[in-house]
């Protein structure tokens, strides 16, 4: 299947950093901690960890393997494992491509806000108070401008292709992200009030458990590992044949989960440090303030109370968010770009502008109809498309794809795979257990 000159990640580490770069994003540093904070802390953390390893990891292996086998864009890769069901396979590929474009269209808006909060404090120190207020306040023009800036950054990286763009930037940015992150956690944990947040995050209170919490945790796991919308499939297609997929996928899942876990160590204690410094974190009704408010007002308020150090920590935090978002958004844009450039035989550098432009246009539409569209696009793409498409991919990989082909593909990176525990469990697991588990999680709230 391999098409001669196809680009490849140049090293195993490069791939892991790129795939972890895709996985680690706003979903980890913003989505996970805020969900954990509003769903009882430790209980959400435990459910999430179970979801990652019981459901998301096996599907991550499936998606990467399909991609590497096909060594082509997701539409073709899916068709290559289901040659007799080409219509089904190509529809899933196209749906994934549309889904991921929808995700990018809201992701770029949120990432734009983070960019605004990164630049805002710098401008205000330099004396441009009103420009800073404009960047940090909510407004249509500001949302559009910031979204466009972030989309341009994404286009700029994807334009340069796999090794010079995606791999190079992921390998540069991911280590910076880790360093910034660990230093911020260490600092926050030393502040007064931090221990209360730590307790909420690590000591389970089972009374918070509910079927809805399972659905949220599953959605969070799928979103966080970038599953179901062909991103991992397209990265898999650039993976070298000698890479051991189950092992690599485990490393990516561990890194991703590790970052989400550490983000919880940062945000939950930070909330209580903020409270300790006089910032409101609970609404009048006693509920925790919601996600947007937490990150965009509670954290900056905490940074403000820290004086000079707070300014630097604030800038570091928002820089971290922008970096994490960028290494994810490039993996999103790569899906439609690889499909369009290979299927229409067009130059990547041209296609990237057309597709990036179309997605930016759709983002603008969302911004102009913010109240009705923003939440809707998030819910359709992440709550429905990601799990449903992930499920269909698992069914195709489990039931239609020839088992000996799967074994052959996976064995290239690990000749002993045939006798391993992984191979004894995984094929049946993806065929039967994953679909049943996912159906249960979906149906539970309905049947309740
Ligand atoms: N995993 C990314 C995050 O956690 C989001 C993402 C979803 C990336 C789907 C690619 C595809 O922010």
Image (spheres, rainbow, N blue to C red):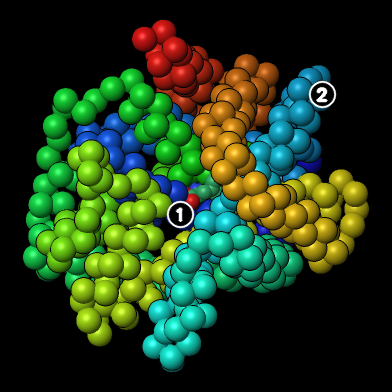
At x 21% / y 61%, what residue is drawn? 279
At x 58% / y 57%, what residue is drawn? 109
Q: Which mark is residue 26?
A: 1
Name above or below for residue 6 compared with residue 369: below
Residue position for label 2:
87
Label 1 within 8 A of ligand 1 by Cβ: yes
Question: Does residue 180 appear to the left or right of 55 in the view shown?
Answer: left
State which quadrant residue 276 falls in: bottom left
Q: How many marks?
A: 2
Q: Looking at the picture, how far across and down is residue 314, in whole percent?
A: 34, 73
Separation of disc 2 and disc 1 at Cα? 34 Å
What crowding class fits label 2: few (fewer than 14 Cα within 10 Å), some (14-19), or many (20 or more)?
few
Locate the N terminus and report the quarter of the image it occupies. top right
Question: Does residue 130 appear to the left or right of 74 in the view shown?
Answer: left
Q: Looking at the picture, how far across and down is residue 275, in whole percent?
A: 16, 58
Residue 303 shows up from this direction: yes
């Amino acid at each position: 299947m391999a098409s001669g000159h196809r680009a490849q990640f140049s090293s195993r580490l490069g791939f892991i950093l790129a795939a972890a770069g895709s996985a680690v994003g706003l979903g980890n540093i913003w989505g996970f901690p805020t969900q954990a904070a509003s769903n009882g802390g430790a209980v959400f953390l435990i459910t999430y960890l179970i979801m990652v390893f019981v459901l998301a990891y096996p599907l991550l292996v499936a998606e990467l393997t399909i991609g590497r086998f096909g060594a082509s864009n997701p539409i073709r890769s899916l068709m290559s494992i289901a040659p007799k069901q080409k219509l089904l396979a190509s529809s899933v590929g196209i749906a994934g491509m549309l889904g991921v474009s929808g995700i990018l269209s809201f992701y770029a808006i949120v990432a734009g806000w983070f960019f605004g909060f990164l630049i805002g404090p710098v401008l205000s120190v330099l004396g441009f108070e009103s420009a800073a207020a404009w960047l940090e306040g909510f407004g249509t023009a500001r949302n559009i401008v910031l979204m466009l800036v972030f989309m341009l950054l994404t286009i700029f990286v994807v334009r340069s292709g796999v090794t010079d763009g995606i791999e190079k930037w992921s390998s540069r940015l991911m280590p910076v992200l880790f360093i910034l992150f660990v230093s911020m956690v260490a600092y926050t944990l030393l502040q007064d009030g931090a221990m209360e947040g730590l307790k909420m995050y690590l000591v389970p209170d089972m009374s918070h458990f509910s079927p809805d919490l399972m659905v949220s945790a599953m959605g969070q796991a799928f979103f966080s590992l970038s599953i179901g919308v062909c991103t991992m499939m397209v990265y898999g297609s650039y993976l070298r044949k000698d890479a051991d997929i189950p092992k690599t996928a485990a490393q990516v899942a561990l890194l991703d989960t590790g970052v989400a876990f550490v983000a919880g160590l940062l945000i939950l204690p930070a909330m209580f440090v903020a409270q300790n410094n006089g910032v409101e974190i609970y609404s009048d009704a006693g509920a925790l303030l919601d996600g947007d408010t937490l990150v965009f007002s509670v954290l900056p308020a905490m940074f403000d109370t820290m004086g000079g150090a707070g300014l630097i920590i604030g800038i570091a935090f928002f820089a971290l968010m922008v970096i994490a978002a960028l290494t994810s958004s490039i993996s999103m844009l790569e899906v439609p770009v690889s499909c369009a450039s290979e299927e229409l035989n067009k130059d990547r550098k041209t296609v990237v502008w057309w597709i990036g432009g179309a997605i930016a246009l759709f983002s603008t539409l969302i911004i102009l109809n913010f109240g009705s569209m923003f939440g809707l696009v998030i819910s359709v793409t992440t709550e429905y498309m990601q799990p449903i498409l992930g499920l269909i991919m698992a069914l195709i990989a489990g039931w239609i794809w020839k088992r000996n082909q799967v074994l052959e593909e996976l064995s290239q990176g690990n000749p002993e795979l045939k006798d391993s525990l992984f191979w004894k469990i995984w094929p049946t697991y993806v065929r039967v257990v994953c679909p049943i588990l996912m159906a249960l999680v979906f149906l539970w709230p309905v049947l309740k």
